Image: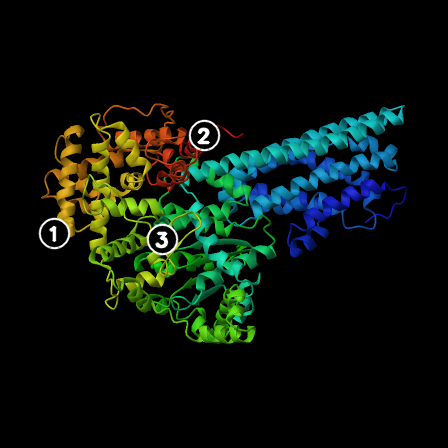
Amino acid sequence: MSLRTGPISMPGRRIIREAFDGLQQTVSPVEAKDFQNTTLEDVQKAALAIENQLAARKTLRNMRRLMPLFQGLEHYSQSIEVLCNGTPYLPWIWAPIKLILTVASDFVEAFERIVTAYSQIAESLPRMDMLNEAFRKNIQFQETLAVFYSDILNFHRHAYLFVRRSSWKIFFLTSWGRFQRRFDTILADMKAHEELIDKTANAVNILEASKMRESLRDQRNENLNDVAKQEDEVSARQYQAIVGWLQIDDTDQQIIFDSIASEAEKNEGTCNWILKQPILVSWMRTQSETPFVWLQGHPGAGKSVLATQIDAFLRSSHQSLVVRHFCTYSYGSSIQFDQILRSLLIQLIRPNSDLISYVYEEFVLAKQAASIKSLSQLIRTICEAISPIPSKKKYVHIILDGLDECDIEKQGRITNLLETLVSLGSPANSGVVKILISSRPTSFLLKRFRKRSTVSLADEKGRIGEAIENYAYQKLSLLDNRFSDLGIRDADIKDLSHRVSLKSDGSYERILSQMIARLDTRSLGRIKSLLGWVAFARRPLTQVECRSAMAFGQGVIETPMMPPQYIFEMCMPLIQENKDGTFSFIHVSVKDHLKSPESTIGLIEADARCEHGVASITCLLAGFRVFDTAYDSNDRNLRILRGIHGFHIYATEYWLEDLLCSNAAFGGSEIAALLCSTARILADRLNAASHLAGTSTEQELRTLDDRLGNFADQGAVYDMLRYALMERSAKTNSDQAKHESFSASHTRPEPQSLKDLLACYQASIRYLLSISSFPGMTLGELEKFKREFRTAAFTCRVRNCPCATKGFSDEKKLSEHEQRHVQRISCTV
C-alpha cells in the first residue's frame, strides 16, 4: 500500500472505519483474510472467467457492463488512498465483488440483478480522475469521498447476505425486493454527494459547500430512517396477513404458559435447581453440543413448571431464539399437529423481516393452502436460513412440553419433525436447532428416546423434595398468625414442610372418596358430569357454561334452572379455576386417575361424549323453542340473564363434532339412545328448512367425513349430518367473515337455521348488555351477567377459529380480528 501522507479528515476516517467494521463483522474470518489480499485486477479477471463459464453453460451475460465500475473504483481508490494509509480498508471496496459474483453465477436471475445493481453504482461514481490531483488532500473533499466508501460497502454487505445465506436461492427474490428501497436510497445518496463534489470543486464560498455537506448528512440519516420505518410497517402488515393465512391465535398458548409459570413466580426459588442440571446446562449453551434433551418425569413431578423456568432463563439471556409450545388436554388446539406446526412457524419468523417477506410472497400472495405437508417443509426451510448473518450461527431453542398428551400417531409425527430440525445443524447451515421435550415416560417415548440425552426427574428426588419442602414452607408460613395462636413455632412449620415433601404422592382416590361420601344419587351424578366436562370438553369451559351444559345434559329442553354453584366448590380439591375463568384439573394425572378402573367415579369417555352431544343438541333445541315468536320475550330474556343458555355458543360450534365422535349410531347404552332420539328431533327441525336433494356418492362421503358412514341407516339424522358437513366444507375464509354490521335490534324473525339461531341469541345478549335494569334481576345479578357474557355477543364468524367461541368485548375488536382472515391484501411495494 502507498504511504502517501497529508492532512487527514478525522470524520472521514471514522465514516470509513464504521463501514469497514460493519462488513468485516458480516463476512467469515477466512473470507476477510482473502479480501485483504485481493487486487482490483483479480476482480476483473474473475469477472471475465465467470463470463466464459456462463457462456459454456449457454447462459452468457455481458460482463463488460462492469468495466465502468472497475475503472471508477480504480480512480476512486486513488482519491481515498490518503484516508486509508496504515489501514486494511482499501481492498474492501472491490474484493467482495469477486466472491459475490462467483457465488451468484449459479443462479442466473440473482446474478443478473446483482450485476445490474453494480452497473448502477458505477453510474453514480463521480469523475475521480479529473478531481483526484487537485482535491486529494482537501479535508472537506475527503469527508465527502468517505461517504461513497460507506455506501459501496453497505451494498457489498447486503449482496453478501443474499448469496451467503443458507438456501439463499429460495429467499433471494423476496429479500431483494425488500432491499430495493434501501438500494434506491444508496444510489440517491451517491448522486447527491456527486453533486456536492462538483460544488466543492467549483465553490468560491467554502461555507456554502460546508452547509450543503451538513444538509446532505442530515438528509442521508433521515432517508435511512424513513426506509427503516417503511420496512417495519410493511413487515408488520405482512406478518398480520400471515397470521390470517395460518388462522392462528396464540391466546390459548399464552394462557397455558402464564397459568403454569405463575406457580413458580408465587413460590420463588423452588425451581432454580433445574438451571444448574449438567445436561440442561449443556443444552442451554449456544454451542452445538447436546442438541436434543428429553426431560421426563411421572405425573406431578413439576415438568411443565420447570419448562417455563428454562424458557424464561433462555429469553433473559438474549443469546438465542426461543420457541415454545405447551400441550394440554384442556385446550384441544394445543395437541393438534397442524396447530403445533402453526405455533412453531409463527414464532420462528416473527423476529426476522426477511423470513416474513418470504412466507408472505411465496405462500400468502400465492394463495397456497396451509397444509400439514407445506407447513412442515416450510419450517425446515426457515430453520435452515434462520440466521440473518450467514457467517454467524443462529441458535434456536425449541421447548415442547406435554408431548405425551398428544395421541401416539401425533407424537411420532412431531418427533420426526423435531429430529429433522436437529439434523439441519451442519457447517453449511447457519441455523442450529436444539430441542427440549418434556413429558411423562410413556412406553412409546421411552423406546423412541432411549438413545437421546435424558433428564429423569425420578433421579432428582433429592432436589424435588427440597423444592416441595420449600413450597410447603412458603404456603404454611402464610398461616403463621393462626399457627402462633396454637403455639406452633417456625421450627414446627419447617418440620411439617419436610414431612409434606416425603408424602406428596397425589392420593386422588382418597380425596375423591372424601368428596363423594354421604352424597345422594343426584349430587353424585352432578359431580361425575362436571368432572366429565372438565376432562373431555373441546375447550375449557367457564362456570356458567359448565352449569348450562349440565342443565341440558339430561335432554330436557324446558329445564328451569342450572345446577348449584357449590358443585364446583365440592370439586375444588381436584379442579381449579384458571385466570381466564375456565376450569381444568389441578394436574393432567387427575384425568388419568378418573378414567382408571381404580377410580370410584370411573369416567367412561364414550359415555361422556354422548352426554356432551345430548347437551349440545338439547341446548340448540331449547334455543329454537325460546326464540319462537310465540315465546314470551320477558321469559326468554330472563332465561338468558340467568345463564341457562350460556352453553349456546359452544353448542353451535361443536354439536356436529360431538355427534360424529359419539357411539350413538351403535347404541348399546342409555345415554347413546338418548343422544339418538335427541338428534332425530333436531334433524326433523333442520331438514325441513334445508331443502335437501340428491344422494351422496361414496367418493363424496369420504370427502366430507369418514365418520358419516356410521350414520348411514339413521335416516333423518344422516341427512342432517350430510347437509351440515357439506355446508361446512363449502365455506371459505372469504365468505365466512363478510363483516356484516351487527343489528342494533334484539327482535329478529323466527330462526330457521343454526346460523339464524346464533344471530338471535347474540342479538339478545347485545340488548341485555345495554340495559341498566330488568324485572326479576338484582343490580348485582345484572352486572355479573355483563361480566360473564360481554364477549359472547361478538364471536368470530370463521369456522375453527379459537375466537369463534371466546369472542371479543366489542364489534370493533371483532372486525379487526376478522380482517386477518380475509386476505384482501394490498401491494406492499
- Looking at this view, is 3 or 245 the one in front? 245
Of the 4 image quadrants, the one containing the C terminus is top right
- Looking at this view, is 594 or 147 the one in front? 594
Image coordinates of residue 578 in percent, x first then y, are 42, 52
Amino acid residing under circle 2: Lys
Please report contact status of discs 3 and 1: CB closer than 8 Å, yes or no.
Answer: no
Residue corresponding to mark 3: 330
Q: Indicate the quadrant where residue 314 lies.
A: bottom right
Mark before the other along the chain sequence, 2 or 1? 1
SS at mark 1? Answer: loop
Q: Residue 667: which disc?
A: 1
Instruction: Tell me: residue 656, above or below residue 32.
Output: above
Amino acid residing under circle 1: Gly
Instruction: Tell me: residue 556, above or below residue 300.
Output: above
Instruction: Tell me: residue 759, above or below residue 248.
Output: above
SS at mark 3? Answer: loop
Q: What is the distance, in whole Å, between disc 2 and disc 1 at their CAs?
A: 46 Å
Residue 726 in the figure: left or right of residue 569: left
Mark before the other along the chain sequence, 3 or 1? 3
Residue corresponding to mark 2: 812
Please report contact status of discs 2 and 3: CB closer than 8 Å, yes or no.
Answer: no
Residue 173 in the figure: left or right of residue 78: left
